[in-house]
Image (tube, rainbow, N blue to C red):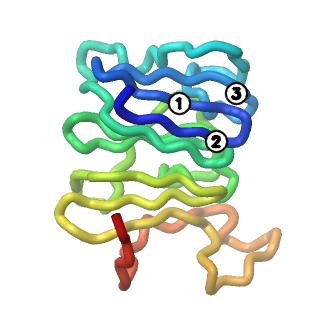
Amino acid sequence: VISLCGGFDYEAAVTDDGHLWTWGDGSEGQLGHGDTNSFPAPRKVEYFRHPQRHPIVYVSCGTQHSAAIDAYGTVYTWGNNKEGQLGQGTTTNTCVPAPVDVDGKGGVCARVHCGRDYTLFEMVEGGTHTTHTNPPTDTPTPNSSAAEQPPATEELNTHTHTY
């Protein structure tokens, strides 16, 4: 296992052969199996077995959404998207991994971190991007346009990562 994470009642692992495995609660599609079923044991995510897809090298689990990076730095997201945390330009949940153009320029993603209702992307070329329909400076309202149309990922002005 080269990457492992846990969300709210579910887990994901990437094996050294580039396969992604998920198990646990799938109620929001966070397992990536194309449905909202739950699985008590690890199950390979079939989306990444297609011959045109590249091996997965990293996975991150949020509360009820997931993200993975392939060997070429393409990032994929799936699961709960009520706050636009998948970065796919909607607030619709998805049960199947979908590629995300993080910076709008086809940039290469080095790392991805899923939180409760956001996703943070670290780019190889530098810079950090995040997805969220209601950034901390906003005061969301149930009928706000921000809740309906998530903005494109935004570059942060500060970078404070310690490894």
Q: Which residue is mark 2?
A: 7
Looking at the image, the residue that sits furthest to the right is 142
Q: Nearer the viewer, mark 3 or mark 1?
A: 1
Quarter occupied by residue 20 = top left
The residue sitting at 38% across, 78% down in the picture is 160
Q: Position of residue 125 (x, y in %)?
A: 17, 64
Neighbor class of circle 3 (other Cα within 10 Å; few <14, some 14-19, many 20+) is many
**Regarding mark 3 in the picture, which secondary structure is present there?**
loop
Sequence order check, earlier mark of 3 and 1: 1
- Are the residues at dot 1 and dot 2 in contact (C-beta closer than 8 Å)? yes
Q: Which residue is mark 3?
A: 26
Whole-number angstrom distance, CA of label 1 to CA of label 2: 8 Å
Amino acid type indicated by mark 2 = Gly
Amino acid type indicated by mark 3 = Gly
Quadrant showing the N terminus: top left
- Are the residues at dot 2 and dot 3 in contact (C-beta closer than 8 Å)? no
Residue closest to the eye, 8 or 35: 8
Residue closest to the eye, 21 or 141: 21
**In the drawing, what numbered circle is on residue 12?**
1
Neighbor class of circle 1 (other Cα within 10 Å; few <14, some 14-19, many 20+) is many
The residue sitting at 40% across, 35% down in the picture is 3
Q: Is residue 102 above or below residue 64?
A: below
Whole-number angstrom distance, CA of label 3 to CA of label 1: 11 Å
**In the drawing, what numbered circle is on residue 88?**
none
Quarter occupied by residue 70 = top left
Quarter occupied by residue 155 = bottom left
Neighbor class of circle 2 (other Cα within 10 Å; few <14, some 14-19, many 20+) is many
